[in-house]
Image (cartoon, rainbow, N blue to C red):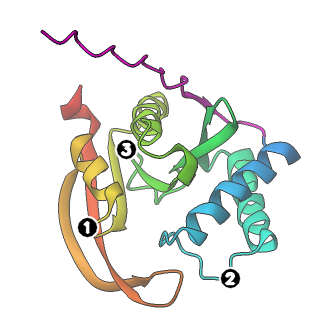
Amino acid sequence: MKPDAPTPPVTPTPPITVRRLDAIGDAELDALARVLIDCVEGGASVSFMLPMTMHKALAFWSRVRDGVARGDRVLLAAEDEQGLCGTAQLILDLPENQPHRADVAKMLVHRRARRRGVGAALLHALDDAARAAGRSLLVLDTVSGSDAERLYLRHGYVRVGEVPRYALWPDGRPCATTYFYRDLARAS
């Protein structure tokens, strides 16, 4: 009889923490820019085209920082043992007939941190932030057929529909976009 092979030791995934960034300093701005650049260079269709420069990324995050300071948006940052590895936003500055709603925007996860629960942790934190802001309906769009689409479906988002050729991949090819919503009032 052959003895059982030893079980390899399990290496736990370091914990992911998510925090709200109410003030964005230069270090956070730089880290956010690096996550955005990594995502675009990795092929993510998130509003930017190649080449993705630090200048473009910093300009974008500077505008986000201004929106956070005005209270127009909520910015979340996910961190692991190496630092900032993901981010997501809630856009709160919507028309006056939509005070119950927020848009989910720019959920980004650095390639080094994917498949470790960062996206799910950000979505849970977005739900909490939306409730704290008095919002009960979340709306978002993402590339059709993407890993993000599957994540949103697993998290309880409802697929509304698809728009063909809505946006471009960073290399210029067209891609379809799928719209989703999540009713937090029903999810409670």
The amino acid on which the numbered mark 2 sits, given as a three-letter code, is Pro
Q: Alpha-carbon distance for marks 3 and 1? A: 29 Å
Disc 2: which residue: 51
Disc 1: which residue: 145
Going from N to C along the chain, the mark reached first, 3 or 1, is: 3
Q: Main secondary structure of the magenta part?
A: loop
The amino acid on which the numbered mark 1 sits, given as a three-letter code, is Gly
Count of labels in the image: 3
In the displayed structure, does residue 46 sit left or right of residue 51?
left
Q: Position of residue 170 (x, y in %)?
A: 53, 81
Q: Give the structural element (helix, strand or loop) at label 2.
A: loop
Check if residue 2 falls in the magenta segment.
Answer: yes
Neighbour class for label 1 at 10 Å: few (<14), some, many (≥20)? few
* Relative height, residue 172 to residue 131 (above, below): below
Disc 3: which residue: 100
Which mark lies nearer to you, 3 or 2?
2
